[in-house]
Amino acid sequence: MDQVASILEQLRLFTIQHAPGGVPTGAVPVALILLLCGIAMSVVGAKFARFALTSAFVVAGGFMGDQFAHAFEFSRPVCVAGGAGLIGLIGFQTFRLWVGVAVAMFLSAMVVGGYGSNRLLPYLAEYTETSSPDFGQPVPVGDTEFSLPTLNEQEAHLNRDPQVWFANFWKYVTERDPGVAHNVQALAILTALGGLCVGLMAVRPSLVISTSLIGTTMVVMGLGTLLSSSVSSAHASIQNNPRLIGLGVAAFLATSLVLQTMLMRKSTVGGPKPAKS
């Protein structure tokens, strides 16, 4: 549990370092955003998934239309409206495909994450120690020598490229345990193909399950961050009761699954009836 919390904290700090300007990066604002988005995802995520996807495609189409108008000097309103309409229609019609892709990615991430939590975390701890910026020319102070990073080394550490960091970490793992790399790749491919098939064949159950899991994860992370930042005593007492955490998460997940299933059934019953042949 402590290792997972440490990894999440490192990811949060890494995200803060690379977040664009104007985005809230404090622990409490980010936790509140996670909490609210997680609750919304857990309650109405499956019901409004198609609307959200189509809206995202409309916005992307409008942006592409604006770029097209700027590049070829056409009418901007016409290009923006046309791009938004065409790309939005593509997103609406290919909704089932994107559900399959999302389920494939989510299932693959879950399986690989579960496998990696046991096999990759030790290598991550070793790599974090070896890649830390605490190196350079030793500076004698009394009878003790301290190793201090140079200004260039500190700047490079703060402005790390995520792709370069991941590539170096993966190289570090494969050099020490090639079997882990092969197993991770095989699991990722197999689970992605299986998730794609499940998402294409069972869209609504896949939406309910995936949005409930994602929403529950966001709620747990948001609450954990709020408690650790605001009420440290409550956070410590909850950490000492892992069964309580498990029961709370299971209850919230079960409630989300039941609510979303009921909402999806109501929308199906209240929808238009198919035409008789």
Image (cartoon, rainbow, N blue to C red):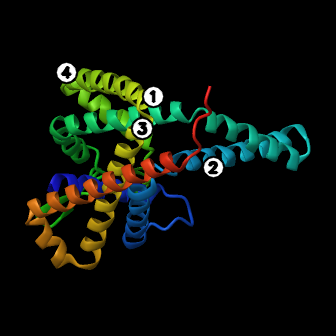
Mark 1 sits on what residue? 200
Mark 4 secondary-structure assignment: helix
Residue 154: horizontal and vertical position, in percent? 39, 55
In front of the other: label 3 or label 4? 4
Nearer to the camera, 125 or 193: 193
Q: Taking 237 as reference, is 193 left or right?
A: right
The amino acid type found where label 3 is placed reads Val
Residue 162 quadrant: top left
Q: Of label 3 and label 2, which has the lower sequence position?
A: 2
Residue 21: horizontal and vertical position, in percent? 56, 63
Residue 88 quadrant: top right
Label at residue 164 = 3
Nearer to the camera, 141 or 168: 168
Residue at the image position 71 percent from the left and 42 percent from the top: 61
Q: Of label 3 and label 1, which has the lower sequence position?
A: 3
In the rendered image, is residue 154 in sight? no
Look at the image and tell me in which quarter the C terminus lies: top right
Residue 37: horizontal and vertical position, in percent? 44, 61
In front of the other: label 4 or label 2? 2
Mark 4 sits on what residue? 179
